[in-house]
Image: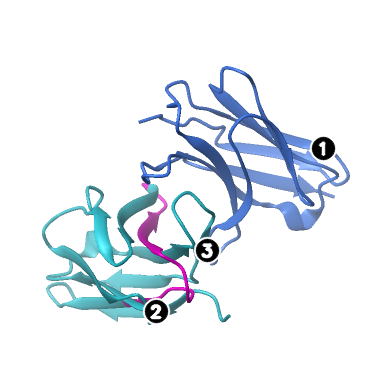
Chain colours: A blue, B cyan
Amino acid sequence: LAKTTQPISMDSYEGQEVNITCSHNNIATNDYITWYQQFPSQGPRFIIQGYKTKVTNEVASLFIPADRKSSTLSLPRVSLSDTAVYYCLVGDSHYQLIWGAGTKLIIKP
Amino acid sequence: DAGVIQSPRHEVTEMGQEVTLRCKPISGHNSLFWYRQTMMRGLELLIYFNNNVPIDDSGMPEDRFSAKMPNASFSTLKIQPSEPRDSAVYFCASSLRAGSEQYFGPGTRLTVT
């Protein structure tokens, strides 16, 4: 099972691009990478999922290098409302799920 | 759809008592997950079901914990007897199919005194 490692906390300012990197050195061939966002007193919410290269949706981009040993969640032009905890999840279709410890992102005005 | 429904939202009980948490997954979702979250240990996957069958319960902390899914629209997580260290927020999540995104419920905040 791939162990995931991500920074405990980060801070940035409104309007900036924020990149959060997750390390998963032992990722398996069948593993996919998923990022979730969690606000206080709420359950995690899906942001984006990918397997390799780059994935983009309306809220974020996910960059995965060729060796897949890490992944980077990119949040463009953050706002105060993006202050939350972000989790990296590595797992396969058989649900061998490994959650990261989460990165607390604080956005300042 | 109303999303994943959990009850109760808050539970306060005394040590030694039985606690039952309930979850209704999103209709049509085939997989259901139970998580526990604390400040110290973060988010922990306790058990998950696929098509009502428990697939992996290796995250269940001890025999005091048990989970059932009698049908596709209902699951329970039971703690008997409860202990103060079980105090946490318990989340239920469901997903449409293997590998797809999980939808989390609002959680049950359990306090064992």
Q: Amino acid at mark 1?
A: Glu
Q: Position of residue A97 (x, y in %)?
A: 40, 43
The residues tagged by marks 3 and 2 sit, at their Cα atoms, a distance apart of 20 Å
- Residue at the spot x=18%, y=65% of the render? B66
Outermost residue on the top side: it is: A67
Q: Nearer the viewer, residue A79 or A76?
A: A76
- Residue at the spot x=43%, y=73% of the render? B25
Q: Is residue A73 above or below residue A47?
A: above
Q: Position of residue A89 (x, y in %)?
A: 50, 42
- Nearest to viewer (mark 1 / mark 2): 1
Question: Element under label 1?
Answer: loop
Q: Dot 2 corresponds to which residue?
A: B10
Q: Earlier in the sequence, mark 3 or mark 2?
A: 2
Q: Is residue A25 above or below residue A63?
A: above
The label shown at residue A30 is none
Q: Dot 3 corresponds to which residue?
A: B103
Q: Residues within 10 Å of mark 2 (few under 14, many from 20)?
A: few
Question: Element under label 2?
Answer: strand
Start and end of the magenta stretch? B22-41
**Chain letter of disc 1?**
A
- Residue at the spot x=26%, y=53% of the render? B55
Left or right, residue B101 beside residue A76: left
The residues tagged by marks 1 and 2 sit, at their Cα atoms, a distance apart of 37 Å
**Chain letter of disc 2?**
B
Left or right, residue A105 beside residue B87: right
Q: Dot 1 corresponds to which residue?
A: A17
Residue B4 lies within the magenta run: no
Q: Amino acid at mark 3?
A: Tyr
